[in-house]
Image (cartoon, rainbow, N blue to C red):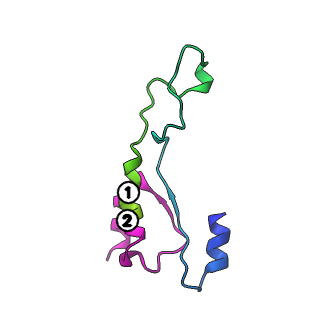
Amino acid sequence: MSRVMAADLRGTGVTVNLLLPGGATATGMIPAQSPAQSPAQSPPQNMTLLDPAVMGPPIVWLASTEAAGVHDERIVATEFEPWLRTRRP
């Protein structure tokens, strides 16, 4: 959907980007395993969930003037710093 929106809004001054956390995130939407749940209903015991704060730096950057003109990008929050370094001269 973001690709369609980016294409539709290209050249209008409205930018569209897709920001993904980079994995399962501790948002309360993934239940902790309980005796009543089967393993298929809960995350594996060795799975480490990402802190939702991982989204903060890329969100702040995307809202800044430094991101002006960034359009139709797929940004993964856990890979934000390396991604940003490749964009800077």
Residue at (41% x, 33% y) in the render: 48
Location of residue 35 by image quarter: top right
In the rendered image, residue 54, in percent from the top left (x then y), is placed at: 38, 51
At label 2, the amino acid type is Val
- Residue receiving disc 1: 56
Location of residue 79 by image quarter: bottom left
Q: How many badges with numbers are in the image?
A: 2
At label 1, the amino acid type is Gly
- Residue 44 to residue 17: above or below: above
| Label 2 CA crowd tier, 10 Å (few <14, some 14–19, many 20+) | few
| Label 1 CA crowd tier, 10 Å (few <14, some 14–19, many 20+) | few
Quarter the C terminus occupies: bottom left
- Residue 6 to residue 75: above or below: below
In the rendered image, residue 76, in percent from the top left (x then y), is placed at: 46, 56
Q: Which residues are magenta?
A: 61-89
Is residue 68 among the parts visible in the rendering?
yes
- Residue 38 to residue 80: above or below: above
Location of residue 60 by image quarter: bottom left
In the rendered image, residue 55, in percent from the top left (x then y), is placed at: 41, 54
Near-viewer residue (53 or 75)? 53
Please give the label number shown on residue 82. none
Residue at (62% x, 65% y) in the render: 2
State the SS at label 2. Answer: helix
Q: Report the side of 22 relative to 14 (left or right).
A: left
- Residue receiving disc 2: 60
Tag 1 near tag 2, CB within 8 Å: yes
Q: Report the side of 64 relative to 25 (left or right).
A: left
